Image (spheres, rainbow, N blue to C red):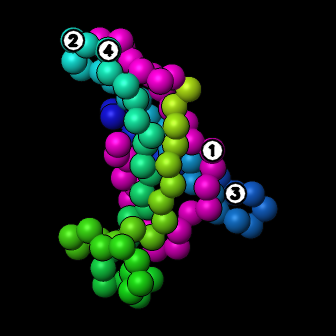
Amino acid sequence: ITNASSQIQYEGSREMIQVMGNVLNTSDRVQPIPALKIKLVGEKPDPRCFDKPQEGNNCILASWEHRLSEQSLLPCEKIHFETDPHPNAEGSQHVRVEF
């Protein structure tokens, strides 16, 4: 996953977040593309972290999966992704994108 970034948008007064980036196959074989896991991460001292899943000194305030349009990537192939806008989680400090 390369060049991952996020963008805040508003639908009325509701703050939404859209995540985009690229998935790159760095191997010399065709590779399947699993669903991307998008996580909005906060820091543990935040009271909103109290009942949320913990990861080290962080908590996951919200998450969703995103499936790409392709099922697999050829060697050295790259595909761009953009998620649909999702409600932003209050207290989120950063976005994590993983398989």
> Are circles 4 and 3 on residues that touch, CB within 8 Å?
no
- Seen in the picture, residue 87 relative to 18 is either above or below; the reply is below
Residue at 24% x, 20% y is 26
Residue neighbourhood size for the residue with mark 4, other residues' Cα within 10 Å, grouped as few (<14), some (14–19), many (≥20): some
Q: Secondary structure at mark 2?
A: loop
Can you identify the residue that label 3 sits on?
A: 10
Question: In terms of sequence position, does the residue under pointer 4 or pointer 3 come before the other?
Answer: 3
Where residue 6 is drawn, which disc sits there?
none
- Kind of residue sitting beneath label 4: Val
Task: Look at discs 2 and 3 and give the one toward the viewer.
Answer: 2
Image coords of residue 70 (percent x, y): 51, 22
Q: Is residue 21 rendered to the left or right of residue 18? A: left
- Kind of residue sitting beneath label 3: Tyr
What is the spatial separation of the Cα atoms under label 4 and label 2, in whole angstroms?
7 Å
Question: In terms of sequence position, does the residue under pointer 2 or pointer 3 come before the other?
Answer: 3
Boundaries of the magenta span: 70-99
What is the spatial separation of the Cα atoms under label 2 and label 3, in whole angstroms?
42 Å
Q: Secondary structure at mark 3?
A: strand
Question: In terms of sequence position, does the residue under pointer 2 or pointer 1 come before the other?
Answer: 2
Q: Nearer the viewer, residue 33 or 91?
A: 33
What is the spatial separation of the Cα atoms under label 4 and label 3, in whole angstroms?
39 Å
Where residue 84 is drawn, which disc sits there?
1
